[in-house]
Image (cartoon, rainbow, N blue to C red):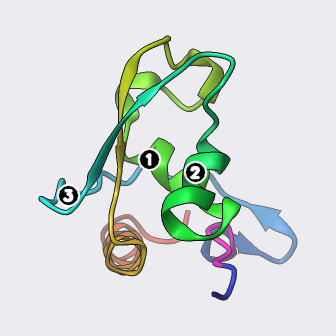
């Protein structure tokens, strides 16, 4: 699987723009897991369910109730793993394109 650089669309001329929060659609194929503080990690969930550790950010995106930092996730929290990966990435990319269409490349 090729790495997906989620920051690529938010850079120009060496400048970085704010990456907006994108709300992902819940799907019946999503996987529900329990987060164990000091044991679980989003990169490990990514490796387990996607076969690569590089999509912890996507799992975080699907769980906005815990904020943008993994250490804010409480013990025994329910975590949604958006699944399958490629379908979720396509949705994410389309919503980023929509965001940039409506709000411009800020």
User: Is residue 81 rendered to the left or right of residue 39?
Assistant: left
Q: Residue at x 81, y 64 (%)?
A: 15
Assess whether mark 3 and mark 2 are in contact (beta carbons under 8 angstroms): no
Q: Secondary structure at mark 3?
A: loop
User: Is residue 35 rendered to the left or right of residue 33?
Assistant: right
Question: Along the line of sight, which residue is nearer the eye, 53 or 63?
Answer: 53
Give residue 18's mark.
none
Q: Residue 56, percent across and down?
A: 59, 51
Q: Residue at x 61, y 68 (%)?
A: 6
Q: Residue at x 53, y 20 (%)?
A: 36
Q: Residue at x 38, y 69 (%)?
A: 92
Q: Secondary structure at mark 1?
A: helix
Give residue 57's mark.
2
Assess whether mark 1 and mark 2 are in contact (beta carbons under 8 angstroms): yes
Q: Residue 48, percent across and down?
A: 56, 57
Screen quadrant of the C terminus: bottom right
**Which residue is denoted by mark 3 in the rendering?**
25
Queried whether the magenta region covers residue 5, the answer comes back as: yes
Queried whether the magenta region covers residue 23, the answer comes back as: no
Q: Residue 53, percent across and down?
A: 68, 60
The residue segment tinted magenta is: 4-8
**Which residue is denoted by mark 1 in the rendering?**
61
Q: Residues within 10 Å of mark 1 (few under 14, many from 20)?
A: many
Q: Earlier in the sequence, mark 2 or mark 3?
A: 3
Q: Secondary structure at mark 2?
A: helix
């Amino acid at each position: 699987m090729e790495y997906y650089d989620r920051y690529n669309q938010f850079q120009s001329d060496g400048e970085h723009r704010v990456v907006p929060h994108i709300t992902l659609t819940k799907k019946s194929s999503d996987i529900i897991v329990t987060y164990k503080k000091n044991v679980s990690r989003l990169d490990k969930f990514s490796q387990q369910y996607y076969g690569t550790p590089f999509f912890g950010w996507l799992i975080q995106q699907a769980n906005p109730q815990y904020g943008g930092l993994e250490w804010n996730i409480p013990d025994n929290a329910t975590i949604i793993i958006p699944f399958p990966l490629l379908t979720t990435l396509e949705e994410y990319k389309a919503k980023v394109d929509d965001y940039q269409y409506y709000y411009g490349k800020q």
